[in-house]
Amino acid sequence: MSSLKSSSDLHDLGVAQLAAKLAAREVSSVEVTQHFLARIAQENLGAFLATNTDVSLAQAKAADARLAAGERTPLLGVPLAHKDVFVTRDFPTTAGSKILENYRSPFDATVVRNLGLEGAGMVALGKLNCDEFAMGSGNDNSAYKPVKNPWDLERIPGGSSGGSAAAVAARLVPAATGTDTGGSIRQPASLTGITGIKPTYGRCSRYGMVAFASSLDQAGPMARSALDCALLLSSMAGPDPDRDSTSLDLPVTDYATDLIASHAPSAGEKPLKGLRIGLPTQFFGAGCAPDVLAAVRGALAEYEKLGATLVDVSLPLTELSIPVYYVIAPAEASSNLSRFDGVRYGHRAAQYTDLNDMYKKSRSEGFGDEATRRIMIGTYVLSHGYYDAYYLKAQKIRRLIAQDFQTAFTQCDIIAGPVSPTVAWKIGEKSDDPVANYLADIYTLSSSLAGLPGMSVPAGFGAGGMPVGLQLIGNYFKEAQLLGAAHQFQLATDWHLRQPPSL
Ligand code: GLN
């Protein structure tokens, strides 16, 4: 309205800025919502799987009524969209799979409820495309359509939260939810030049998140800045004792206030003085592309200017995180996905001879190649005679990986390195090669196996002008420290404000 040049400015604003305009009543939630819905209607990235104008506008009207009544909660009236693995009453939920086509949940996931009108008051714009059951690194495993990277429409946006990342990067939404089992928030954030944080395992409730690998799955926010992520995480997180027994029994933190308050340095002092950043030698070896390493090293030099010191640390089992994760995650997936049987949920084959045939046909028709591959691998590693050799062995190494992090954290406060060994690759380049996809997860899997919080912060550009993210990994429950370190970096740099050239 008055202070805006035109409504086309709205999508350039981040969450904090939109919230401030809404609170000042310079713009209404209905106007903001209409603006983003109009952009979404034009999108050519394959980012959205479902929208519903009536639902979104009704939510925006309700938020406006609360604003008119004087309510001032930090996110009231700001729109967002959800990865399609969070179940929602108001939109279908597919988890990117044909087996859940047209599925409608009778309830909202806890994260959706916490952020929505029953909680923070955000407006849901729809559901975002993802790899089937969050299995993938390129968002080319969606059963519906691949997602394109707004920086180069011929490239993948990363996965599995690729729809969330592409939508935020293309300014179709100011923020989105994502999930990270082995890197699915951090890697697509890195490859699309946005900010994302995977909190400590258990920080956000998994209730209503379609389960992939339950000991690893964790929800988190994806937005343009650390400040915006802090605002969202403060509302998403929190204990959910009646519905998710693994949710952490810790009070909800106001990350945004913490971040602003605790990082206002006194005059003349460097803001990150005393922060020790550990660089694992295994993250900086020949496996990482030189263009990615150059951007990461540039970001680390900036951290030194901000007062941080860099120390070498070692995570000796980094390479084993790939085989360990690709035993444990499929094992848990094979168990979780057994509920899709053509009886209780989703797709049922039209023709079958008996019950077994019905299960077989429904599941064969409903699951895509990657989900099928993981069900088979998982069933194999859990089967009698192989359990000790694969699953149990993987669990033992998982423990050692977690211990290595604790050793490293005796020398440093935060661990840093690349998120992905390369920039985003071309769509189709790795589609026929599952192992090539698995190898691309090398820098994100170990912290997932350990249950540690991690984030991706835009750190520059590499080959083809594609974005590169810096990964920051913290010790358990140290989300505030990670967000603070990212926020200081973003006060000193503008990588997170760069826009894809096509916009
Ligand atoms: N790329 C990893 C996989 O395919 C991680 C996915 C995720 O974090 N959901 O399993």
Image (cartoon, grey):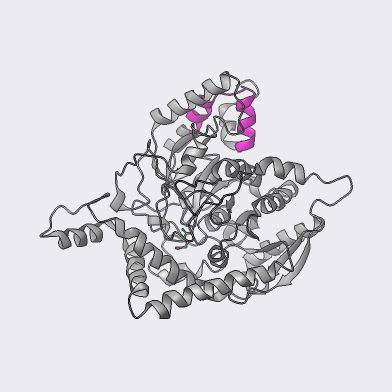
Compared to residue 327, the image places residue 109 above or below, namely: above
Specify the segment rendered in magenta.
Answer: 15-36
How many numbered discs?
0
Q: Position of residue 275 (x, y in %)?
A: 77, 59
Classified by dominant secondary structure, the portion drawn in magenta counts as: helix
Would residue 19 be counted in the magenta stretch? yes
Q: Is residue 48 magenta?
A: no
| Observer able to see residue 5 | no
x, y percent for residue 180? 50, 56
- Nearest the viewer among 265 and 468 is 265
Residue 225 located left or right of residue 66: right
How far across and down, in percent of the image, does residue 271 sit?
80, 50
Asked whether, in this view, residue 360 is left or right of residue 382, the answer is: left
**Residue situated furthest right in the rendering:** 268
Residue name at image x 36 percent, y 72 percent: 382
Q: Residue at x 34, y 81 (%)?
A: 385
Residue 231 in view here: yes
Quarter of the figure with residue 463: bottom right
Question: Considering the image in quadrants, where does the C terminus appear?
Answer: top right
Q: Is residue 262 above or below residue 283?
A: above
- The residue closer to the viewer here, 149 or 421, is 421
Query: Height in image: 224 above or below 476?
Result: above
Q: Residue 35, percent across and down?
A: 50, 30
Looking at the image, is 189 positioned above or below residue 392? above
Q: Quadrant of the N terminus?
A: top right
Q: Nearer the viewer, residue 160 or 151?
A: 160
Q: Quadrant of residue 274?
A: bottom right
